[in-house]
Image (cartoon, rainbow, N blue to C red):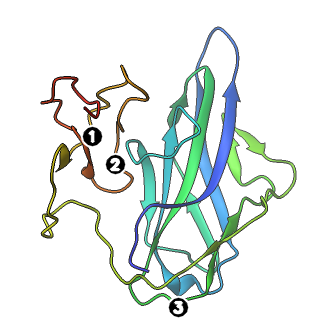
Amino acid sequence: TGSTNNPILMSTLRVTGNTGNITLDRYQAHSLNTDDNDITAVKLYYTHQEHFNNANLVAQVDGFTNGVVTFEDLELDLPTGYLYLWLTYDIAEDAMHGNYADAYIPAYGVVIDGEHLPAEEHSPPGRRIIYETIFYDDFETDKGWILSGEWERGEPQGLGGSHGHPGATHAHTGNKIIGTDLSGLGAYPGDIE
């Protein structure tokens, strides 16, 4: 409860061709939630990889209307290659513990360059269970964490990788995270030493 940008649906788009532009015009989803009042905002993001981040917000609305959310007049140019669309929910502080958060794309609920897709309803398996949050921190403000060594609170910069994978490039919500050597001040910038 009280969390933001919870991914509910991911749609993979593959754009091919050499010339011209293709535009996402509309994206519609229908509720499969236990109670739409548990949802305070519905957002549409895109990424260039299969992992969610909140860097590219396309549109948002204040929840569902009669079980439907429609993002219209998007005019989002779709680049050649793969693009991932993410439908996310912000969950209300007073959402009911144990309720479900879920959605589906109805037949012809997505419009790309005037073409209505998909031909059939798209409802992937699974659903998210809403759990009561005992403690939540998006790290935007200092809530008194005692950090030692290379642990820091700050904006991710994607540093490191010479000894493993690089650090995060985006926060899941907001702009800040807690991580090791986020500022790159160590002997091996961004890596644990």
Is residue 85 or residue 169 the one in the foreground?
Answer: 169
**Residue extending farthest right:** 120
| Distance in Å between CA atoms under marks 1 and 3 | 33 Å
Q: Identify residue for label 3.
A: 96
Q: How many marks?
A: 3
Against 185, residue 35 (above or below) is below
Q: Identify residue for label 1.
A: 156
Against 155, residue 145 (above or below) is below
Residue under the point 46% across and 85% down:
132
Can I make out residue 74 in this image? no
| Distance in Å between CA atoms under marks 2 and 1 | 7 Å
Which amino acid, mark 1? Pro
Q: Identify residue for label 2.
A: 171
Give the image quarter of residue 114.
top right
Q: Position of residue 76 (x, y in %)?
A: 50, 36
Can I make out residue 108 in this image? yes
Q: Position of residue 63 (x, y in %)?
A: 49, 74
Query: Which quadrant is the C terminus positioned in?
Result: top left
Q: Position of residue 5 (x, y in %)?
A: 44, 61
Q: Secondary structure at mark 3?
A: loop
Give the image quarter of residue 9.
bottom right
Mark in the foreground, 1 or 3:
1
Q: Secondary structure at mark 2?
A: loop
Q: Position of residue 48 (x, y in %)?
A: 53, 31
Which amino acid, mark 2? Ala
Query: Which quadrant is the N terminus positioned in?
Result: bottom left
Q: Are marks 2 and 1 in contact (CB under 8 Å)?
A: yes
Give the image quarter of residue 184.
top left
Residue under the point 65% across and 8% down:
18
Label 2 neighbour load within 10 Å: few <14, some 14-19, many 20+: many
